[in-house]
Image (cartoon, rainbow, N blue to C red):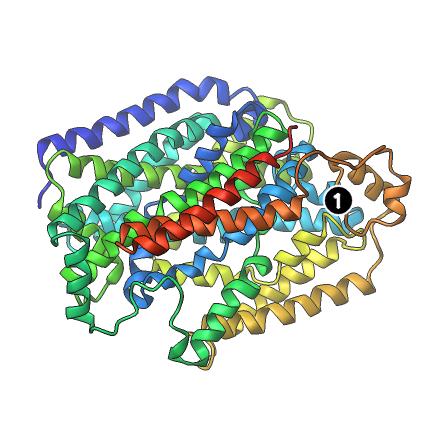
Amino acid sequence: MKLSPIDGAIIIGYILFALGLGIHYAKRAGKDINEFFISGRNLPWWLAGTSMVATTFAADTPLAVTGLVVKDGIAGNWLWWNMVLSGMLATFLFSRLWRRAEIITDVELTELRYSGRSASLLRGFRALYIGLPINCITMGWVILAMQKIIVLTLNLPDTAAWKVVAVLACMLIAGIYCALSGFWGVVMTDLVQFCMAMIGSISLAVIAVVKVGGIGALKTKLAAVHGANHTILNFLPDLGMGEMAILTFGVYLGVQWWASNGVDGSGYIAQRMFAAKDERNTLLATLWFNIAHYTLRPWPWILVALVSMVVYPGLEDAEAGYPMLMLEYLPAGLLGLMITAFLAAFMSTIDTHLNWGASYLVNDFYKRFFKPDADAHHYVVVARISVVLIMVVAGVTSLFMNSIAGAWKFLIALNAGIGLVQILRWYWWRINAWSEIAAMVASAVVSAVVFTLPQTKDNFAIQMLIIVPISTAAWLTATLITSPVSEETLIAFYNRVRPRGGWWGGIARRANVKSMSENGTPALMNWLLGSVFIYCTLFAIGKLLLGFYGLGLIFLLIALMTEAVVYRGLPKC
């Protein structure tokens, strides 16, 4: 189906709206880097949380989920569903600690928690490492997804030249907007983008299922195309397929969620925590993010993926099934809305990563090491230049990618083994800067090796089981053979963030914090109950949508009971 004039009008209208919003917030964002990077710490929970959701709802996610479902059935989503456990950990154990730190970036925590030259080295290295290569790999797969959508939508030749044109068009719009508006513009368009993307994805799912005759007909056709004994609709992997299936699922639930970078909510999620009004708004924002991210968004994508398996069986690029159905089934107007939703999702994620990456380059590298005493206007100018620099590097990176889901797995492996250090830095006084440095270097080196060896390059579970133990051994060794952080720094950190529990020993006794008691259900109990609530809600919605009403109602009942307990146990401040 070709774009109609009304579709084009909707798309152009959104672009003009976004640029207008960028211009509107340009003056406010230009005050200082607190406004440019964290909105002056003034966001309510619903806006901060929705911004988190919108950022993770990029142009790549529906395509990547489609590829996972086509390859491994619904259970293929455990590649990211396992992260519910880390999401709840970030919500109940770390969200308020991040807010208490009163910093601009999570990398800035380095010199708050550690001392000496090693802390400075780590801060500078992480600013460049995350701000450029890691950040640009993430943006690269988002750009790749949008490039696929543009090529299919406009019926362009699938050649390198047209891919470059598509990338340039996408990045130009997003880069200009982000450089103008700062974080204020990012979060405000996030709100609009989330609403548009949900409307568009739900509409496509409903229309796609109706086109194939409804859920019953869809299940019948899946059986006809893929065999009566297929396991596509199973929510858990088919463990009868052999040891490797069991091993992979075990790695998802037993290793990946706690071993990967960001388990404590660091990164662009932490950026939203810093921007929230207070600790309670920070916790509620992170909780809302996890609910929406895991329970509301996946099923429209999964339903469309299932339809694509019936309509386009054996499609060479499985990820392209999503936009192909969009172009084939959506009527004029709704197609324009859906493409606009993809564009908005793309801009939301790219603008976040441009702003977030620039915050590292400016706050943790340029300001920290080169020009610490410049005026506020100077840093904002440097921030806008940094946005353009990151935009160019990310665009070039995307040209060397061909699989979104593959890039996901590579980035997970690249950061495997770092997670446990990120947890323990809040709760064990002995962790120091060399712990993090050793974990990062070991994970990067070992992942580079396992991704090239023929025996391991296509086996995600084996990769994780090699990377994590080696990385853990490296950082434990580094921790024990290097000097601890100075007592003065540890006491100052403890007084500032007030971590509850852990292994602080004499530091806790010498700190000025009078009482560590907090109201509400203990954090670890909320973590466990919150995880049960998210998973049961996710499964309940899926079972009910697919017509398995008995199991769906059981999951729903468990979800409602755990939700009630979690809600009553939330801390009041």
| Residue 167 locus on image (x, y percent) | 30, 47
On the question of residue 561 being in view, the answer is yes
Going 76% across and 34% down the picture, which residue do you hit?
496
Q: Does residue 527 sit above or below 21 in this rendering?
A: below
Which residue is nearer to you in this view: 169 or 533?
533
| Residue 484 locus on image (x, y percent) | 84, 54
Going 58% across and 36% down the picture, which residue do you hit?
362
Tag count: 1
On the question of residue 159 being in view, the answer is no
For label 1, the SS is helix
Residue at label 1? 113
Please indicate whether residue 361 sits to the left or right of residue 486 in the image.
left
Please indicate whether residue 492 sits to the left or right of residue 520 in the image.
right
- Specify the quadrant of the image occupied by residue 344: top left
Going 50% across and 43% down the picture, which residue do you hit?
561
- Specify the quadrant of the image occupied by residue 459: bottom left
Which residue is nearer to you in this view: 261 or 201?
201
Which residue is nearer to you in this view: 509 or 160?
509
- Specify the quadrant of the image occupied by residue 391: top left
Please indicate whether residue 116 sits to the left or right of residue 267 in the image.
right
Rendered-image quadrant of the C terminus: top right
| Residue 361 locus on image (x, y percent) | 57, 41
Q: Does residue 167 sit above or below 414 in this rendering?
A: above
Q: Does residue 531 sit above or below 408 in this rendering?
A: above
Please indicate whether residue 382 sits to the left or right of residue 493 in the image.
left
Residue type for callout 1: Arg
